[in-house]
Amino acid sequence: MERAEYLLPLSRPKVGVQGVTGSWRIRKPTINYVKCIGCGLCWLYCPDSVIDIEDVGSRFRVSIDYTYCKGCGICASVCPVKAIEMVKEV
């Protein structure tokens, strides 16, 4: 099985103002791309489906849609190499 075969079209965040995170978020995840191994666990466990995975050749690159991210920290908790850190929202 090739790596991209397991990427399924999962639900996306609500479109429009319904799913938008307001100014109440206290922490947000940041990704250390040097540490990230592209395993996809953050993408799999994100309850708001705000993490995207892009296949960039030999590995995956993840990105976060901060417009809809609630800052729950689940992505940071499940990361096996601690490549995601929750930082204070400014």
Image: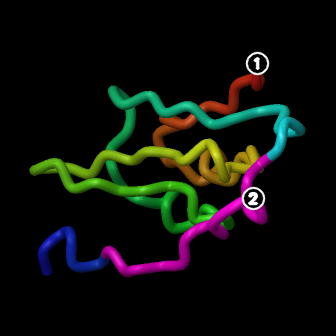
Circle number at residue 90: 1
Q: Residues within 10 Å of mark 2 (few under 14, many from 20)?
A: few
**Residue in the image at 10% along x and 50% along y:** 57
Toward the front, the furthest residue is 16
Could you say which is closer to the camera, residue 24 or residue 42?
Answer: 24
Q: Is residue 35 above or below residue 79?
A: above
- Main SS of the magenta part reads loop
Could you say which is closer to the camera, residue 11 or residue 82?
Answer: 11
Badge 1 marks a residue whose secondary structure is loop
Badge 2 marks a residue whose secondary structure is loop
**Is residue 12 covered in magenta?**
yes
- The residue that disc 2 covers is 17
Q: Is residue 71 above or below residue 52?
A: above
Q: Quadrant of the C terminus?
A: top right
Could you say which is closer to the camera, residue 43 or residue 78?
Answer: 43
Question: What amino acid is at disc 1?
Answer: Val
Q: Quadrant of the N terminus?
A: bottom left
Q: How many marks?
A: 2
* 46 relative to 51 in the view: left or right: right
Residue 24 rendering spot, x and y as whole percentages: 89, 38
Q: Is residue 89 above or below residue 9?
A: above
**Residue in the image at 55% along x and 71% along y:** 12
Residue 77 rendering spot, x and y as whole percentages: 66, 48
Residue 38 rendering spot, x and y as whole percentages: 33, 49
* 4 relative to 50 in the view: left or right: left
Is label 2 or label 1 in front? Answer: 2
**Residue in the image at 56% along x and 57% along y:** 50
Tell me the distance, in whole angstroms, between the alpha carbons under discs 2 and 1.
21 Å
Query: What's drawn in magenta, residue-wise?
Result: 7-21
Q: Are marks 2 and 1 in contact (CB under 8 Å)?
A: no
